[in-house]
Image (cartoon, grey):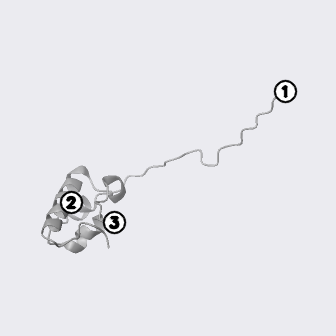
Amino acid sequence: MIKKNTKEPKKFAKRGIKFKKDCAFCKNDLEIDYKNVELLSRYVSGRGKIVSRRISGNCAKHQRKVACEIKRARFMNLIPYVGK
């Protein structure tokens, strides 16, 4: 009895194709400030969590600064701690 190869070819052979996102702060030379709620709200999810570097595309330096300023804006009650 001869066994045939029953495995089908994978549809998604290359999984997780990654591409480099550019940091918006390095690219446009933007200033990060806790008073700029419109800018900071782009980096907060609908549930109120800070968006990760992998999703936002920020470099490590600016992601730390964004996180610090979001926390500061939350403390000053400019941004809610939880989502809507």
Q: Are marks 3 and 1 in contact (CB under 8 Å)?
A: no
* Farthest residue, direction top: 1
- Residue visible at 48% across and 49% down in the picture: 17
Left or right position of 80 against 8: left
Which mark is drawn over residue 47?
A: 3
Q: Earlier along the polypeptide chain: callout 3 or callout 2?
A: 3
| Residue identified by numbered label 1 | 2
Q: Earlier along the polypeptide chain: callout 1 or callout 2?
A: 1
Left or right position of 3 against 64: right
- Residue visible at 36% across and 57% down in the picture: 55
- Label 1: few (<14), some (14–19) or many (≥20) C-alpha neighbours in 10 Å: few
Q: Quadrant of residue 80?
A: bottom left
Cα gap from disc 1 to disc 2, whole angstroms:
62 Å
Image mark count: 3
Which mark is drawn over residue 66?
A: 2
**Which tag is nearer the camera, tag 3 or tag 1?**
3
> Where residue 63 sits: x, y (%)?
23, 55
Say what secondary structure mark 1 lies in: loop
**Which tag is nearer the camera, tag 3 or tag 2?**
3
Cα gap from disc 3 to disc 1, whole angstroms:
56 Å
> Where residue 3 sits: x, y (%)?
81, 29
Kind of residue at disc 2: Val
